[in-house]
Amino acid sequence: MKHLIIIGARGFGREMFDFAHHVRAFREGAFDFKGFLDDKADALDGYPCSFGEYPPILDSVEAYVPEKDDVFFCALGDAKWRRIYADKILAKGGRFISLISDEAHIAPGAKLGQGVQICSWTSVSTNVSIGDFSVVHPYSSFGHDATVGANCTIESYVFMGGYSAIGDGTTMHVRSSILPHKRIGKNVVVGVGSAVMRNFGDGVHLFGNPAKKIEF
C-alpha cells in the first residue's frame, strides 16, 4: 500500500482529502492517508473533518524527505505555485498520483499525466490528452483529440471542441469554451462564459463572446 501525502493543507487540501476518499483506488486499498505538507503548522486547526479527523501536517515541502512508499498530490489552486511545489518534490525523487472521480467518463484512449485531478461528471473523449498537474472541475467536456497542457486549471462547465488545444498553465474559467480546431497558448486566462473562436498566443487574457484580448 502507498501512503498519500497532500501538498497544501488549506481549503483545496481539505477538499482533496475528502475527494480522495471517493476514488476507486482508495476504496480498493491502493493507498491510505499519511498527512499533509504545509509551512503553516496550524492550517487545519478549527476545521471539522468528514472522516473523523485529519491526518497530521508532517512538515513543510522544503523540509520533507520522501520515503519509499510515499505518493503525493499537489492541492494548490494557483497553477503557478502548484507547479513550483510539485517540482520541489519531484527533485527529491517523489512520485505523484492522479485522482479521478468514479463518476467521470474517461475514454480508453485518453492520456492523463501525473498528478491530475478529474472531478465528477466530466467527459474526456477519445484521444484527449491532459498534461501533468492539471485540475479539471465538475461537468467539463473534452471533445475527441483535444489537448490540455500541463498545469492547467479547467473550471466547471468548460467545453473544449475536437482537436482544440490549450497550452501549459492556462486557466479556463466557469462556462468558457473553445471551438473545435482552435488553439490558445501558454499561461492564458479565459474569462467566465467566454467563447474562443480563433487562435491566440501566449500570456493573454480573453473575455467575451466571441473572446477578445483584454487588459488588466
Image (cartoon, helix red, strand yellow):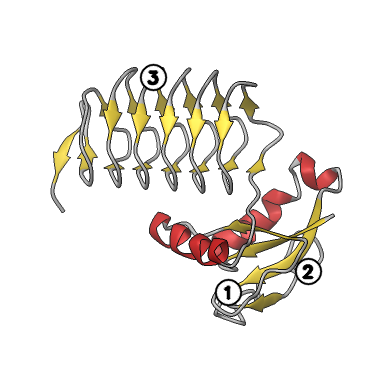
Q: Quadrant of residue 55?
A: bottom right
Q: Residue placed at 42% from the left, 29% from the top?
A: 147
The crowd level at tag 2 (other Cα within 10 Å; few <14, some 14-19, many 20+) is: few
**Mark 2 belongs to which amino acid?**
Glu
**Mark 1 belongs to which amino acid?**
Asp
Does residue 22 appear left or right of residue 127 in this picture? Answer: right
Camera-nearest residue between 151 and 197:
151
Q: Nearer the viewer, mark 3 or mark 1?
A: 3
The residue beneath circle 1 is 38
Q: Which mark is residue 163?
A: 3
Q: Nearer the viewer, mark 3 or mark 2?
A: 3
Quarter containing the N terminus: bottom right
Q: Is residue 9 above or below residue 153?
A: below
Does residue 95 appear left or right of residue 50 in this picture? Answer: left
Q: Residue placed at 39% from the left, 20% from the top?
A: 161
| Dot 3 and dot 2 residues touching (CB under 8 Å) | no
Task: Give the SS element for disc 1.
Answer: loop
Q: Is residue 119 above or below residue 4?
A: above
The crowd level at tag 3 (other Cα within 10 Å; few <14, some 14-19, many 20+) is: some
**Mark 3 belongs to which amino acid?**
Tyr
The crowd level at tag 1 (other Cα within 10 Å; few <14, some 14-19, many 20+) is: many
The residue beneath circle 2 is 53
Going from N to C along the chain, the mark reached first, 2 or 1, is 1
Q: Residue placed at 84% from the left, 44% from the top?
A: 27
Camera-nearest residue between 150 and 177:
150
Does residue 101 appear left or right of residue 124 in this picture? Answer: right
Q: Which mark is residue 214?
A: none
